[in-house]
Image: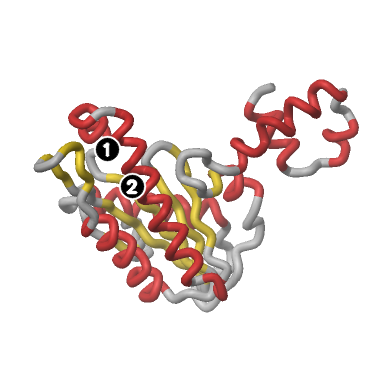
């Protein structure tokens, strides 16, 4: 069963479901749990973003995080430790999502070392504060390979925002693209920082 097929099933299209035979449906059920939820971090996956949030509510922020130099972490400390880094970041995201639960904050592992958070009813300044809190909490944690061998991890983040006073056409893909541009600027400005999408292409 390919990715596109699972995407259709995850969308609960009745025509698609009615066309599945029993064997294919059983296979889909087994795969959907890992398809919709990341087994490593416990976060949702990018499918939740692709299938959900069809209509972005007013005053919504999107924060895109990326682990700095993650390949170097894997190469230096091994992939098992790289997984531990991702697990810890997942824990940080879950804790902060719960603390924002009244606002239906939703965090997910978007792929590889990239994480994404949707923040409804949140100004761009409060989204920046949220992103800084995640970044600082991750950086404050020391990962330990062995006694005396410790290292820290940094995150870069980009923030975009939707406000109907200024934009009536923005959708989730546009918000993602703008957050990605802000993340790119954070990466190329020294990493370990949060940048806001300014509306002029950066």
On screen, residue 157 above or below 126:
above
Please tell me in which quadrant of the rendered image residue 58 appears.
bottom right
Marks 2,1: beta carbons within 8 A: yes
Residue 70 numbered mark, or none: 1
Q: Residues within 10 Å of mark 2 (few under 14, many from 20)?
A: many
Residue on which the image places disc 2: 66
Q: Position of residue 85 (x, y in %)?
A: 32, 43
In this view, 105 is above or below 65: below
Residue drawn at x 38%, y 57% as measured from the top left: 92
Label 1 neighbourhood size at 10 Å, few (<14), some (14-19), many (20+)? some
Residue 53, percent across and down? 63, 57
Left or right of 34 on screen, residue 149: left
| Of the pair 50 and 71, the residue shown nearer to us | 71
Give the spatial CA distance, label 2 vs label 1: 9 Å
Q: Find residue 37 and name its label.
A: none
| Corner quadrant of residue 2 | top right
Who's the residue at 61% across and 42% down the image?
A: 36
What is the x, y in percent for residue 97? 48, 64
Q: Quadrant of the N terminus?
A: top right
Picture coordinates of residue 146, whole percent (x, y): 17, 37
- For label 2, the SS is strand
């Amino acid at each position: 069963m390919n990715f596109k097929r699972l995407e259709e099933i995850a969308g609960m299209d009745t025509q698609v479901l009615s066309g599945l035979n029993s064997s294919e449906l059983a296979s889909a059920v087994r795969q959907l749990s890992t398809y919709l939820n990341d087994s490593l971090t416990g976060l949702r996956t990018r499918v939740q973003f692709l299938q959900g949030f069809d209509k972005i509510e007013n005053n919504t922020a999107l924060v895109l995080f990326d682990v700095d130099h993650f390949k170097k972490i894997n190469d230096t400390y091994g992939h098992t430790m790289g997984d531990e880094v991702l697990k810890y970041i997942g824990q940080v995201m879950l804790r902060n999502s719960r603390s924002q639960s009244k606002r239906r904050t939703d965090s997910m592992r978007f792929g590889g070392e990239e994480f994404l958070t949707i923040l409804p009813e949140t100004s761009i300044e409060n989204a920046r504060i949220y992103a800084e809190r995640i970044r600082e909490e991750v950086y404050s944690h020391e990962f330990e390979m062995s006694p005396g061998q410790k290292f820290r991890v940094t995150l870069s983040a980009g923030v975009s925002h939707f406000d109907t006073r200024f934009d009536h056409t923005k959708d989730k893909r546009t918000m993602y693209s703008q957050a990605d541009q802000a993340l790119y600027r954070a990466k190329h400005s020294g990493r370990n920082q949060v940048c806001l999408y300014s509306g002029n292409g950066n």
